[in-house]
Amino acid sequence: WSSDVCLPILYAVLWLTPCSLEELMQVTSTPELTLKTEMGRLSDYHLVTRDPKVETGGREFLAPANITLLSGLVSPKVNDRKSIERKAGSLRVEKKGRRKLFQY
């Protein structure tokens, strides 16, 4: 596996968990086919899991609780981490607003 591709994706999942494939594409600027392939590899190593419930935006991916502890080790190895953090932060704020919108 290529750390140049996998580590930014894993880092984005750690920031966004739970997150959809579309959100990961937006944050990492990774093409869909590459993202699906790398998410499969990360899943094979139990670094991400798929949420069994399906929301309107499709199946969501999660970082297991024990994997979130790795963010400090992953962070220094990600070349574009500031970009991922910025994009994930703004997406998180937007996502939070949408969730409030649909709560009764």
Image (spheres, helix red, strand yellow):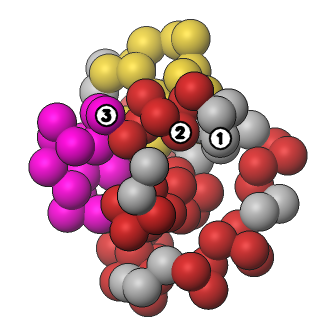
Which residue is nearer to you in this view: 84 or 94?
84
Q: Secondary structure at mark 1?
A: loop
Do residues under tags 2 and 1 come within 8 Å of each other at their CB atoms? yes
Task: Judge whether 104 appears above or below 11 on screen.
Answer: above
The stretch of residues the image draws in magenta is 21-37
Q: Which of pointers 1 and 3 lies earlier in the amino acid sequence?
A: 3
Q: Residue 62: x, y in percent? A: 60, 37
Quadrant in which residue 97 is drawn = bottom left
Q: Residue at x 74, y 74 (%)?
A: 73
Q: Which residue is mark 3?
A: 37
Task: Judge whether 74 appears above or below 76 on screen.
Answer: above
Would residue 62 appear left or right of 55 to someone viewing this image?
A: right
Q: Residue at x 38, y 84 (%)?
A: 80
Would residue 51 appear left or right of 12 to someone viewing this image?
A: right
Quadrant in which residue 71 is drawn = bottom right
Q: Amino acid at mark 3?
A: Thr
In the rendered image, residue 101 lying in the magenta stretch gets the answer: no
Q: Callout 2 environment at 10 Å: few (<14), some (14 to 19), or many (20+)?
A: some
Q: Amino acid at mark 1?
A: Leu
CA gap between label 2 and label 3 equals: 9 Å
CA gap between label 2 and label 1 equals: 5 Å
Q: Which residue is mark 2?
A: 42
Q: Which residue is mark 1?
A: 47
Quadrant in which residue 15 is drawn = bottom right
Q: Taking the image as drawn, is residue 97 in sight?
A: no
Do residues under tags 2 and 3 come within 8 Å of each other at their CB atoms? no
Q: Residue 33: x, y in percent? A: 16, 36
Task: Judge whether 74 appears above or below 103 on screen.
Answer: below
